[in-house]
Amino acid sequence: MGAFKRLPGALAIVALLLNLTACQAPEGEGDAGPDPRMQAKVKENIKPVGQVNVGQVVASATDAGGAAAARSGEQVYNAACMACHGTGVAGAPKVGDKDAWRPRAGKGMNTLLDHAVNGFNAMPPKGTCADCSKDELKGAVEYMLSQTGL
C-alpha cells in the first residue's frame, strides 16, 4: 500500500524530467525552423492506412448544386429495410407475409409511416436509413405492402 502512496510523486518527477529534456533544443536548430524533410516523414508515418466504407453514398443536395434525386421505395427497401424485413429479425414483419402485415396495414398508412419515421418496438427511428426522407420511407413502406399483396 505504501508504494501506491509514492506513485503520484514519482510520476510527477518523471514528468518534470521529461518536460525539461523536451525543452532542450540541440545547438543551432532553435532558430532555423522546422525541417521540411522531417515534416514529410512525420506526415508519411501518421497517414491513414485505409478508409471505412459504411454503405451506399447518396449525393447530397449541396454536392449536386441542387436537390438530390429521391430514391425509390424499392431502392430504400433493398438498401436499408431488407436486412430485417426480408428475414423477420427482431419481430419485423417479413415482406410477403400477409398474416403479419394485414393488421399493420389495417392501421393505415399514417400509422405505418409514423412507425417507420419514429421507430416502433425493436425498430429504431428510420430503421437503418438515417439519411432517408419521410417520402423515401413512405415509398419503402408502400413497396413492402405491394410486394406482400396488400
Image (cartoon, helix red, strand yellow):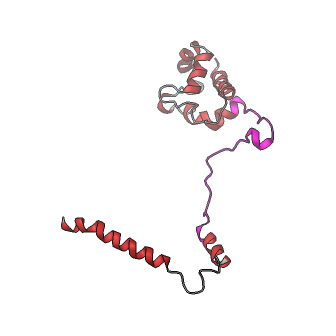
Q: Is residue 22 above or below residue 62?
A: below
Looking at this rendering, what residue extends furthest in the left direction? 1
- State how many labels appear: 0
The answer to if 70 sits in the magenta stretch is yes
Q: Nearer the viewer, residue 74 or 39?
A: 39
Residue 26 in which image quadrant: bottom right
The answer to if 76 sits in the magenta stretch is no
Residue at (42% x, 75% y) in the render = 18
**Residue 28 horizontal/vertical position (percent):** 60, 86
Residue 84 in which image quadrant: top right
**Residue 43 horizontal/vertical position (percent):** 63, 69
| Span highlighted in magenta in the image | 45-74
Q: Nearer the viewer, residue 114 or 24?
A: 24
Q: Is residue 104 above or below residue 33?
A: above
Residue at (56% x, 23% y) in the render = 115
Looking at this rendering, what residue extends furthest in the front direction? 31
**Residue 2 horizontal/vertical position (percent):** 19, 67
Q: Main secondary structure of the magenta part?
A: loop
Residue at (47% x, 31% y) in the render = 90
Please give left or right for residue 121 compared with residue 135 in the image: left
